[in-house]
Image: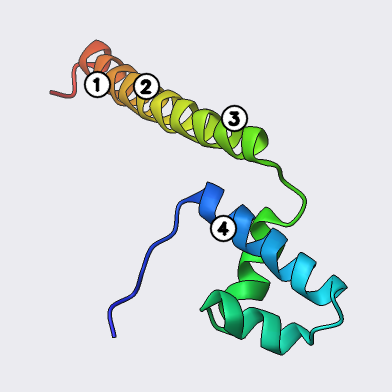
Amino acid sequence: MPRKSYKPEEIVAKLRQVDVLTSQRQGVAEAIRSIGVSEVTYYRWRQEFGGLKSDQIKRLRELETENTRLRRAVSDLTLDKLILQEAARGNF
């Protein structure tokens, strides 16, 4: 069975769906089964996305993208600095 990858917005919606089902006196295991994921996946999602709302998910994704871009820039500049230091020492 192929694995389905969910978008963060879909994950938050599924977590809220489980909350609604459990508030309607349905068991947690039954609610998790009804959304179509395993218990391990549910608890991992809950740990990662537990208290977030949709707009916060969007902001989180933007920050992760910016963080990746900045890390790449820092690594490029660090490499350039090391090359210039070696050239200045005459060890080329």
Residue 64 or residue 31, whichever sits in front: 31
Say which quarter of the image contains residue 73.
top left
> The C terminus is located in which quarter?
top left
Instruction: Tell me, yes or no, whether the two marked residues, 1 and 4, touch with CB atoms within 8 Å.
Output: no
Give the labeled residue for mark 1.
83
The residue under the point 87% across, 81% down is 25
**Front label number (1 vs 4):** 4
Give the labeled residue for mark 2.
73
State the separation of the CA atoms marked 4 and 3: 15 Å
The residue under the point 63% across, 73% down is 42
Dot placed on the residue nearer the N-terminal end, 4 or 3: 4
Dot placed on the residue nearer the N-terminal end, 1 or 3: 3
Dot placed on the residue nearer the N-terminal end, 2 or 3: 3
Q: Secondary structure at mark 2?
A: helix
Q: Horizontally, is 49 left or right of 11 in the view?
A: right
Dot placed on the residue nearer the N-terminal end, 2 or 1: 2
**Front label number (4 vs 2):** 4
State the separation of the CA atoms marked 1 and 4: 45 Å
State the separation of the CA atoms marked 2 and 1: 16 Å
Per the rendering, the mark at residue 11 is 4
Amino acid of disc 2: Ala
Q: Secondary structure at mark 4?
A: helix
Dot placed on the residue nearer the N-terminal end, 4 or 2: 4
Residue 72 or residue 42, whichever sits in front: 42
State the separation of the CA atoms marked 4 and 2: 31 Å
Say which quarter of the image contains residue 4.
bottom left
**Front label number (4 vs 3):** 4
The residue under the point 76% across, 73% down is 21
**Front label number (2 vs 3):** 3
